[in-house]
Structure formats: C-alpha cells, structure tokens
Image: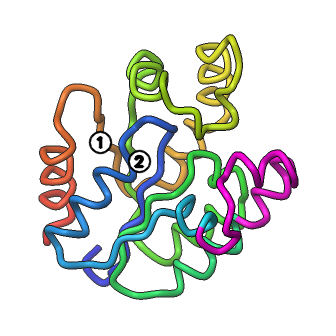
Amino acid sequence: MAEKRNIYIVGPMGAGKSTIGRHIAQQLHLEFFDSDNEIEERTGAEISWVFDVEGEEGFRVREAGVIDDLTQKQGIVLATGGGSILSKEVRNRLSARGLVVYLETTIEKQLARTQRDKRRPLLQTDKPRAVLEALAAIRNPLYEEIADFTVRTDEQSAKLVAKEIIDKLGF
C-alpha cells in the first residue's frame, strides 16, 4: 500500500470527509484538496448555484474533471463529494491512483451534522431523512466497492479518526 502516495476520502455527506482529510494532510505533511471547494474556486460560484444552473448532471461532469485533475497530483489528500463515486470513471481513477478510505456513518449522524447546512442542494427538502436513505442505498455499495478500507466516524472525534486512518496506512 505504501507505493500509493495519494489518499482519497469517500463517503456520504456529513461523514467528516473534509475535516478528517485536513487532519490527515496536516499530520502527514501532504497537500489537502476538497473537490467541492475546488469546483467552487474554478467556477467562481457555490455548488448550489452550479446545481441550479447546470443540474446535477452538469455538476457531475465538472466534478469528474476536477477529480481527474487532482488525482494526477502526487502526495495529496482529497476529500471527494459524496456523489462523485456515481461515475464509474471516477471510481476507477480513485482506485488506480491512490488509497481510498471510506468514512462510514449513520443516517442519524448525517442528519445531525447537516441539518443547518444550506449549501447541500440535495438536502434542500422537507424530507432530508428520505433523501439520505435513498442516497445510501445507491452509494454505500459503491463506496465499499472501491475502498481499500472503511472507518466508522460516528463515535470518535475527527482527530481520532484521522489517527486511526494514518495508523492503518502504516505511515
């Protein structure tokens, strides 16, 4: 595993991908990227605006391009968007270009962590639990498919989860 120098964090929204990814990058002295932040920087607009204007399909095309660019770098930690793994092309790139860590969490934790976040277009509904359950049914098997290993994030702080991941990586 040590020959793969990049670490890619996948999982559902609210799993802690960005926070945990930052901790890992800081501790390992690697560069950190968040694919959603990168899309916002490149477009000059928030994700919700991109969704409104281009729809989810247009957003996913942008996301796949950003992930392709970022995964060509060496020595990075990348927190991916929760839906990025819907693309087989993205899944293949992540698997081939680095170590994939799946951050697993419960629907309850996702709801608690995202309830006040207005920047998540898919959750701008009066039934966020139903949306999260539907997304989990489709996406969780895809996260599992490409993960080199899985870590639950429900009961530990982001720092402890990051330490657990670093220990598992053997860095």
- Dot 1 lies on which element? strand
Name the kind of residue labelled 2 in the image: Tyr
Image coordinates of residue 119 in percent, x first then y, are 59, 40
The residue lying furthest to the front in this view is: 44
In magenta segment, residue 42: yes
Q: Is residue 98 left or right of residue 119?
A: left
Nearer to the camera, 92 or 9: 9
In magenta segment, residue 110: no
Q: Residue at x 17, y 37 (%)?
A: 157
Classify the position of the C terminus by image quarter: bottom left
Image coordinates of residue 73 in percent, x first then y, are 46, 87
Q: Residue at x 59, y 14 (%)?
A: 129
Image coordinates of residue 90 in percent, x first then y, are 65, 65
Q: Residue at x 57, y 46 (%)?
A: 82
Say above or below: 21 vs 121: below
Say above or below: 55 vs 76: above
Classify the position of the N terminus by image quarter: bottom left
Disc 2 versus disc 1: distance between alpha carbons? 6 Å
Q: Residue at x 21, y 43 (%)?
A: 158
Which one is earlier in the sequence, the residue at label 2 or at label 1?
2
Nearer to the camera, 93 or 26: 26
The picture quadrant where one finds residue 165 is: bottom left
Is there a contact, CB below 8 Å, between mark 2 and mark 1?
A: yes
Q: Main SS type for the magenta part?
A: helix
Image coordinates of residue 50 in percent, x first then y, are 77, 54
Residue, disc 1: 151
Q: Is residue 49 left or right of residue 34?
A: right
Find the magenta span and give its range: 41-62
Q: Which numbered tag is attached to residue 102?
A: 2
Name the kind of residue labelled 1 in the image: Val
Say above or below: 102 vs 137: below
